[in-house]
Image (cartoon, rainbow, N blue to C red):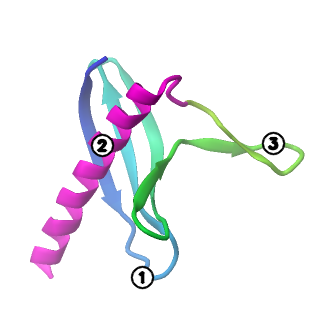
Amino acid sequence: MNISEVRVRLVKKEEGKLKAVASVTIDNCFVIHDVKVLEGNEDFFIAMPSKKTPDGEYKDIVHPINTETREMLKKAVLDEFEKARSQAENED
């Protein structure tokens, strides 16, 4: 699997845990929209797109099957998030 492109849109809200939303293109032929970048207690993490079930739970719509792929996706998204954040700070 090759991650072809990651696009990150920063969220302008000063409060809240949601910091950005990303789209990830895989092998120039498949895209995953609405990957969220969230701020945790110690670091940033990603959350895959999900939907609310009738019983009120949230279930991922799409997700990596193994740890290696999850880490590759996480690194790609968070690297682009850091670039976008640095660029936004330099523009301010």
Left/right of residue 14 with respect to residue 56 in the rendered view? left
**Residue behind mark 2:** 75
The residue at the point 39 percent across, 64 percent down is 43
Local crowd size for mark 3, using a 10 Å CA cut-off: few (<14), some (14–19), many (≥20): few
As measured in the structure, the alpha-carbon distance from the residue carrying label 1 to the one carrying label 2 is 24 Å
Residue 13, placed above or below residue 63: below
Residue 92 disc label: none
Could you tell me which secondary element the residue under label 1 belongs to?
loop
**Residue behind mark 1:** 14
Q: Which residues are magenta?
A: 63-92
The residue at the point 30 percent across, 51 percent down is 78
- Nearer to the camera, 14 or 1: 1
In the current view of this chain or complex, which residue is farthest to the left?
Answer: 90
- Nearer to the camera, 87 or 71: 71
- Nearer to the camera, 74 or 37: 74
Instruction: Residue 35 in the image: state x and y as whole percent.
Output: 46, 45
Instruction: Residue 42 in the image: state x and y as whole percent.
Output: 43, 68
Count of labels in the image: 3
As measured in the structure, the alpha-carbon distance from the residue carrying label 3 to the one carrying label 2 is 29 Å
Counting residues from the start of the chain, the first of labels 1 and 3 encountered is 1
- Nearer to the camera, 71 or 76: 71
Counting residues from the start of the chain, the first of labels 3 and 2 encountered is 3
**Residue behind mark 3:** 53
Quarter of the image for the N terminus: give it: top left
